[in-house]
Amino acid sequence: MEIDERHLEQRRIVSKSMDDPNHIAFNLLRTRVRQAMSDNKWKSIAITSPTPGCGKTMVTLNLAFSLSRNPGLKTVVVDLDLRRPSIAPTLKIEPDRSIAQYLLERSDEARDCFVQVDPNLILGLNSGHTPASSELLQAPRMLELFDYIDRELSPEIVLFDLPPMKSSDDALGFLPRVDTSLLVVASGTTTTAEVDECELQISELDKLLGIVLNKCEDAQAEDYYY
Ligand SMILES: Nc1ncnc2c1ncn2[C@@H]1O[C@H](COP(=O)(O)OP(=O)(O)OP(=O)(O)O)[C@@H](O)[C@H]1O
Ligand SMILES: [Mg+2]
């Protein structure tokens, strides 16, 4: 499936075209994530945040485009924000079938929920609002989805875009199923208490790879031209 690159830049997805120097930050993140995952033989990583709007989907997609540019680094992204899915709208694509429908057993074929947007990048999409999402994320059907991803898509790395931790127990309930996670926090919005609380909860599960500080005002784009 083709995606509209002009639309991507409007939504701050800069790691596909690489015209915007901000994509360098995602290459740095990509390399650090890749090294840690490779050292630990990890494959799956969740992206969450304390509260809504910190930039989880933006970070997930930029990281995914950056990772998938590496030859042979097959990357799968799964939108598991079942309450407010935003991968498809951010990329302006319409899924035929959603991950939620598969988890609700209204759709038998997991492959119908996935689209390939780059040679190395496959996305599992969602649409609409799904009630009882926490239970769905912990249901046995989720294991069938993991099995499908592993067996049929054979990715090197799988990124899960999760809901915020303080809005529901969706993220906390799902975290035991991944190898590690990134906590995205927003400068000027996320409080120190929120960072501490989420960091503690994720660390108790031993799933915290790191914290991504987003929406900083003082990033130095000139460094790119160095
Ligand atoms: N570094 C940034 N600078 C300015 N705006 C940003 C930045 N990162 C994200 N945004 C904007 O903030 C909004 C929220 O971003 P995004 O949808 O990625 O957050 P989210 O954490 O996934 O939100 P939700 O909790 O609703 O899923 C979007 O409009 C996005 O373009
Ligand atoms: Mg989001």
Image: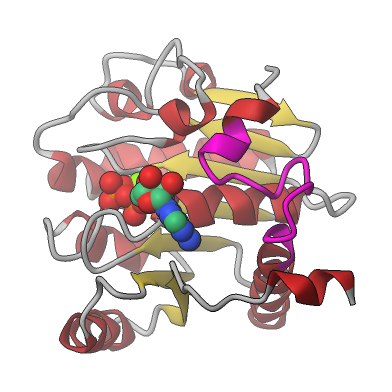
How many numbered marks, from 0 up? 0
Pick the quarter of the image with the C terminus: bottom right
Colour scheme of the rendered structure: secondary structure
Q: Quadrant of residue 213?
A: bottom left
**Residue 155 visible (yes or no):** no
Image location (x, y in percent) of residue 130: 17, 30
Residue at left offset 35%, top offset 72%:
185
Image location (x, y in percent) of residue 218: 53, 78
Pick the quarter of the image with the N terminus: top right
Please, what is the dominant secondary structure of the magenta stretch?
loop
Q: Report if residue 123 lies within the magenta region.
A: no
Residue at left offset 67%, top offset 69%:
25
Q: Report if residue 10 lies within the magenta region.
A: yes
Image location (x, y in percent) of residue 114: 54, 25
Residue at left offset 66%, top offset 48%:
14
Say above or below: 135 vs 141.
Answer: below
**Residue 104 visible (yes or no):** yes
Side of 92 relative to 106 (left or right): right
Residue at left offset 66%, top offset 64%:
26
Pick the residue in front: 145 or 171: 171
Image location (x, y in percent) of residue 87: 45, 35
Please state the extent of the stretch shown in magenta in the rendering: 8-24
Side of 31 relative to 205 (left or right): right
Pick the residue in front: 147 or 9: 9
Say above or below: 12 vs 188.
Answer: above
Side of 214 relative to 115 (left or right): left
Q: Which residue is the extreme one toward the top?
A: 96
